[in-house]
Image (spheres, coloured by chain):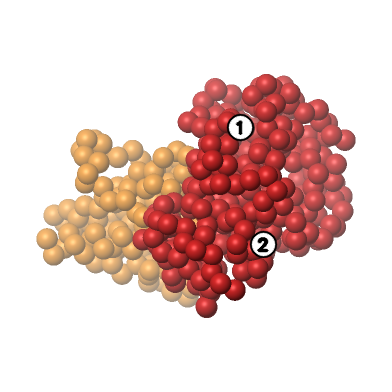
Chain colours: A red, B orange
Amino acid sequence: MTVEVDTAPQFSAFAHPERLVSGDWLEAHLGTPGLVVVESDEDVLLYETGHIEGAVKIDWHTDLNDPVERDYIDGAAFAKLVGAKGISRDSTVVIYGDKNNWWAAYALWVFTLFGHEDVRLLDGGRAKWEADGRAYTTAEPEITPVDYPVVERNDAAIRAFKEDVIAHLGNPLIDVRSPEEYSGERTHMPAYPEEGALRGGHIPSAQSVPWARAVAEDGTFKSVPELDAIYREGAGLKDGDNIVAYCRIGERSSHTWFVLTHLLGFEGVRNYDGSWTEWGSAVRVPIAKGTEPGAVPAK
Amino acid sequence: MTTEDSGAELPEQLAQIREDFLALAVRERLQLLLEFSNELPELPERYLDHPDLLERVEECQSPVFIFVEVDDASIVHLYATAPKEAPTTRGFASILAQGLAGLTAEQVLAVPDDYPNTIGLTEAVSPLRIRGMTALLGRTKRQVREKLVA
């Protein structure tokens, strides 16, 4: 059972307005049968300090990543995880989190790998919810576990691996990291040295569009004209393009994946979650240094 | 990696903190970390006016700043501040501030560098995140060394 979409006017110009809900909508729909609210943060304790009433927590490190291999959990583990959170295959899932929904978008992308149909973001995430003076609780939600079917992950549509990126060269690539990471001055993000790589720079021909440019001052997504100026005029993306976005470990680029896919309506956008921590440490892959994209490498 | 057998060498408060965490189920360890987070004291006023004296711990995913004093009796005082949006980092800093309280410079320098990996939090918060606490301890010790030669 799907919960009605948010028809707020600020979403109507987006390609898939049904992928966003506002604070007003969420507040009015809390407790609606079929709706499960999920908090997904960078900080693993933030949920415990207070969360939206009834929201369950899903953590990117301890829940969504396979504990051994560098991969996401499989269909059986996903079914167990979300079923225990009271999420059914037909639930409407609304995800929100800290840092402009950075990790919330990542969780949404992982839900999409498993083909969960109705998964949305709370526009503005925690920051906007708080700025609007809306309530949090520390009360644990009452969860009725349900059976979620075991669905095998379908990586092909929205996930790119290193070999896919090599085959993709010549098509648009979006590097969403900081300018210092793009140019190769840094091999890791400021404040994240543990997620480094052996070489600095970017994948040749990739356009630099730091992910946070898609976000307005208050944490909500920018409007379509503003996003068009960044991604179409700025980065040269055109309808019909096959696009791969990448960052450092694939989380910031899942935010950009959301913007390109659900807000601007590009089809066939893939997130390269191996990203720079793989590419920048791989043997014999082409790398460009400096602020210019550089030429497409000969194959 | 748990180094249970090195417990005897640990200063009492650090050993107690480790014991308290290990006695809990993984899920409950987060609650205890949250308690520590809430207990992180405010900075003394002399540092509120002098943010330049604080050192940013770059290895932490959220902004956290520390300052270490070694007093005339060679006792170490660790001060730390991190925003409320970063409760995990606050918790890490609070564990160290409480665990190192009253220790001499020599005792602080003798704390095993892998102490953060031994208190049962790697499973609860992930190994990647625990590195932030390892970095906090490392920088605290470095500041102590610098104060000793100064």
Residue furthest to the left: B150
- The answer to which image quadrant residue A96 occupies is top right
Q: Nearer the viewer, residue B136 or A36?
A: A36
Measured from the top left, where is residue A57 in percent x and y?
A: 66, 44
Under tag 2, what secondary structure? strand
Sequence-wise, which precedes: disc 2 or disc 1? 2
Q: Amino acid at mark 1?
A: Val
Q: Is residue A145 visible?
A: no
Which residue is tagged 1?
A: A224
- Give the number of marks: 2
Q: Chain of mark 1?
A: A
**Residue at the image position 78 percent from the left and 54 percent from the top:** A114
* Residue pictured at 48% horizontal, 31% vertical: A217
Query: Does residue A112 appear anywhere in the picture?
Result: yes
Q: Nearer the viewer, residue A102 or B66?
A: A102
Q: CA distance from mark 2 to mark 1?
A: 26 Å
- Direction from residue B52 to residue A149 in the image, left or right: right
| Mark number displayed over residue A160 | 2
Residue A75: quadrant of the picture: bottom right
Measuring from the top left, give residue B123's x and y in whole percent. 59, 61
